[in-house]
Amino acid sequence: MSKQIVSPFSYLPLYNLLSAFGWAYILYAVISIYPKIGQPVFFEQTKQAVIIIQSCAAIEIFNSALGIVRSPLTTTVAQVTSRLVVVLGIFSLLPETPAARSYAYISLLLAWSITEVIRYLFYFYSLSAKEGPSKLLVLLRYNLFWLLYPIGVGSELYIIFSALPIAASKYSEQYRYFLIVCMFLYIPGFPTLFLHMVTQRAKVMKNLRAGPAQKKD
């Protein structure tokens, strides 16, 4: 069966390309702007862009639920909602959170942006390029997660934990409990996402070792 190529300007490729550009901007900001201005100024100047770019990923839940993409709904919901808790629940509602103004914000953005630039470009070329993504992009996609996923999740949890006292004083104990529940949901959520990537990596690496001639269409 031959691979079906779609136009780069159709819905899914264009969404992935624009998302890659968005996260590339965040990565550029961390590398080029942060060293010049430091924290907490960097957080104040970039938080709105991070909130908007990450919130757009909610589209992926609908894509998965409607069968537009083959990504498992469970892992998609786990990844997107955990990040929405951080950007909406902390950066938007509790911007005074100490960890958001610390190095944890930098490690978070590095882990998120590198992961997402690679992931979205991988999807873009998988959909719109006849030869698919390059071998380098495939290797980055299915190997960097070993490091980037734990850094990202660790940063997320640290930022949420740092926000707990402020959540109680600024809003209510109920909001603090909500954030605690969200933290506990990482216990099943992170292993589900991480093991999914491990399983996918095993399949992809097997195909790479087999070579093009032995791959199934």
Image (cartoon, grey):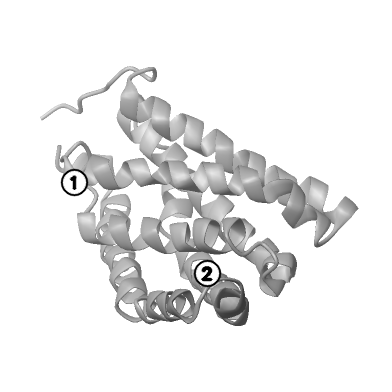
Left or right: 74 with respect to 15?
left
Q: Nearer the viewer, residue 172 or 56?
A: 172
For the residues bearing labels 1 and 2, Cβ distance under 8 angstroms:
no
User: Residue 35, how many percent across, how many down?
Assistant: 85, 55
Q: Secondary structure at mark 1?
A: helix
Q: Is residue 201 visible?
A: no
* Residue at x-position 60% and y-position 59%: 91
Left or right: 194 with respect to 110?
left
Q: Earlier in the sequence, mark 1 or mark 2?
A: 1
Task: Name the residue tied to disc 1.
Answer: 65
Residue 93 occupies which quadrant of the picture?
A: bottom right
* Residue at x-position 32% and y-position 66%: 193
> What amino acid is labelled 1 in the image?
Ala
Q: Nearer the viewer, residue 111 or 38?
A: 38
> What amino acid is labelled 2 in the image?
Leu
Say which mark, if any, is on residue 147: 2
Q: Is residue 197 visible?
A: yes
Q: Nearer the viewer, mark 1 or mark 2?
A: 1
Residue 89, compared with residue 20, is above or below; it is below
Left or right: 38 with respect to 57?
right
Q: Secondary structure at mark 2?
A: helix
Q: Nearer the viewer, residue 66 or 176?
A: 176
User: Residue 2, how many percent across, how many down?
Assistant: 15, 26
* Residue at x-position 51% and y-position 38%: 20
Q: What crowding class fits label 2: few (fewer than 14 Cα within 10 Å), some (14-19), or many (20 or more)?
A: few
